[in-house]
Image (spheres, helix red, strand yellow):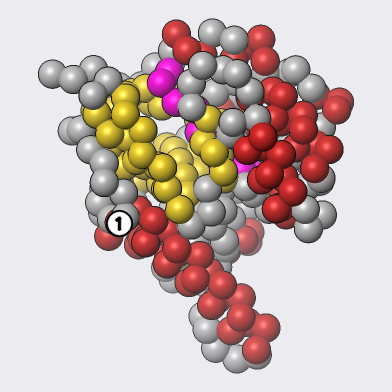
Amino acid sequence: MNSSIRIAAIGDLHMGEDNRNRLRPALERLRDRADVLLLAGDLTKHGTSDEAAVVRDEFSDLDVPVIAVLGNHDYHSDEQNKIARVLREGGIKVLEGDGVVLDIHGQRLGVAGVKGFCGGFVGRCASEFGEPQMKAFIRHAKEVAGRLREALEGLDADVRVALTHYAPVEDTLAGEPLEIYPFLGSYLLAEAIDDAEVDLAIHGHAHHGCERGMTAGGVRVRNVAQPVLRRAYAVYSMNGFGLEPEHP
């Protein structure tokens, strides 16, 4: 049997000069524990390219591939393109409606990612009705989910992972106020994940949520926001048959 693929993941780091090198000591031995590292957005505090340089320095030269999506904080200063460019200078693969396939232990790991967007969940979601602003809001949510669907379906891989910032399910929001659920994610992301028969979905954004959830189609979902994990990263061990018991 092929060796398991070990996926490390973390999100919502909100980095800047004041927390430079905060995670680096724990990352130095990452190669011993994981084959790839996924970053689930909100990497910067205020979305500046200077903050992105701190992220780049923190996650460069780790001897494992690093794959990221941006989050809403990374868009705040309208420098998201600069941020992506700075991260790529450090060898970090930044996804937005595209994917990457890695050869790990003779298996093909495919990761597709988008930032995602909000809108809510079945029974408590906004609709494309009414004012032009509301219609544009929901159309954007649909467009983003469509890009995730296309990227996932385009992966030629043995194991497929969806990487987003916004949550695809309500399960991992437990602990957040119900009033803000519509601003934390969208069921449209989960529909794309289920339709593409994904093996694992990783997201962040919900600081007061919980780690584990599942889509209606049975895909395991993990909220890796750092305030939830309360550690440098989580590691999920996978093979072509699904998610195995996770590392502590």
Q: Residue at x 55, y 88 (%)?
A: 129
Which quarter shows the C terminus?
top left
Which quarter shows the N terminus?
top left
* As drawn, 216 above or below 203: below
Q: Residue furthest left?
A: 1
Q: Position of residue 155 (x, y in %)?
A: 31, 49
Three-letter code, disc 1: Glu
Provide the secondary structure element on which disc 1 rests. Answer: helix
What is the tally of numbered marks visible in this picture? 1
Q: Residue at x 85, y 28 (%)?
A: 17
Write down the quadrant of residue 51 in the picture: top right
Q: Residue furthest front?
A: 89
Q: Is residue 243 magenta?
A: no
Q: Residue at x 27, y 34 (%)?
A: 108
Q: Residue furthest right?
A: 18
Compared across the picture, whether 26 is left or right of 238 comes to right
Q: Residue at x 42, y 67 (%)?
A: 146
- Closer to the camera in the image, 26 or 120: 26
* As drawn, 80 above or below 237: below
Compared across the picture, whether 243 is left or right of 42 comes to left
- Closer to the camera in the image, 68 or 172: 68
The boundaries of the magenta stretch are 34-42
- Which residue has dot 1 on it? 153
Q: Position of residue 87 (x, y in %)?
A: 66, 37
